[in-house]
Amino acid sequence: MKQYFSLFLIIFLAFFICVNGTSQSSVNPIFEIIWESDGSGCIQFSTNNPEYYGWSWWEFVDNPNKRNTYEIECRRISGNDRMGYGMIFGASNTDDSIYYFLMINNNGYYCILKKQGPNETIIKEWTLSEKLNIGYDAVNTLKVIKKGTTFTVFLNNRQVFKFNDKSINGDRLGYWVSIGDKDFESFPNIPVDIRFRQK
């Protein structure tokens, strides 16, 4: 009887270890790649950290010899396809919280906003554009040209919008990423992964 009990205990423990080990290995490890080179000429923003649900991230970059012209390539590899990402332009040279930004998503929509400290103003509401390439891993070129107080917006080198504003005095360029909340993203299983390249 003791031998049978010992055999049963060994089988039970082996089963428990196998099941427990499998469940642990199925959970993806948490990682962050925040504004780093991906080794192929792009800047990568990627994370699956649930602490960042609902966050927005931005990074200013040099814009040499292109004063008043702002241009980048960007593509989403994974993450919620409705969340925005894109380009900061015309940013204040002295205040990191004052800028315009042009966002797109993977479904072919774009919008333009102005941020001045805690205040955001919509310049162009989310609008569908046939000029955007749609889907994951689709590359899009975003460009804005400033002349005086007039900003002309291009998607894949085709003009889509023009606006006038003189409330921000600056010429800096940057990248922008919005992360959805837990109802939009699937961390840690599916990361937000977006790549940027200056043109």
Image: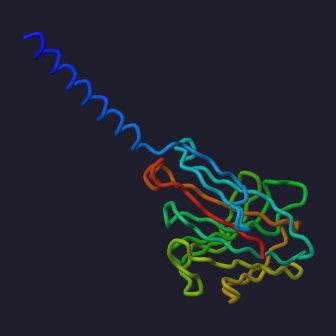
- Where is residue 161? Give x, y as percent: 69, 84
State the residue in front, 112 or 74: 74
Residue at the extreme front of the image, as rendered: 3
State the residue in front, 96 or 113: 96
Q: How is the image coloured?
A: rainbow
- Where is residue 89? Give x, y as percent: 78, 69
State the residue in front, 68 or 2: 2
As displayed, is residue 192 above or below residue 66? Answer: above
- Where is residue 156? Give x, y as percent: 67, 85
Which of the 4 quarters of the picture holds residue 152? bottom right
Instruction: Indicate left or right for 181 with 95 as reference.
Output: left
Residue at the extreme left of the image, as rendered: 1
As displayed, is residue 25 above or below residue 118? Answer: above
Which of the 4 quarters of the picture holds residue 21? top left
Instruction: Indicate left or right for 21 with 13 as reference.
Output: right
Q: Quadrant of the N terminus?
A: top left
Q: Quadrant of the C terminus?
A: bottom right
Residue in the picture at 62% in, 72% down: 111
Residue in the picture at 51% in, 60% down: 79
Residue in the picture at 50% in, 75% down: 135
Residue at the extreme right of the image, as rendered: 65
- Where is residue 72? Give x, y as percent: 74, 74
Residue in the picture at 84% in, 79% down: 146
Marks counted in the figure total 0
Residue at the extreme top of the image, as rendered: 2
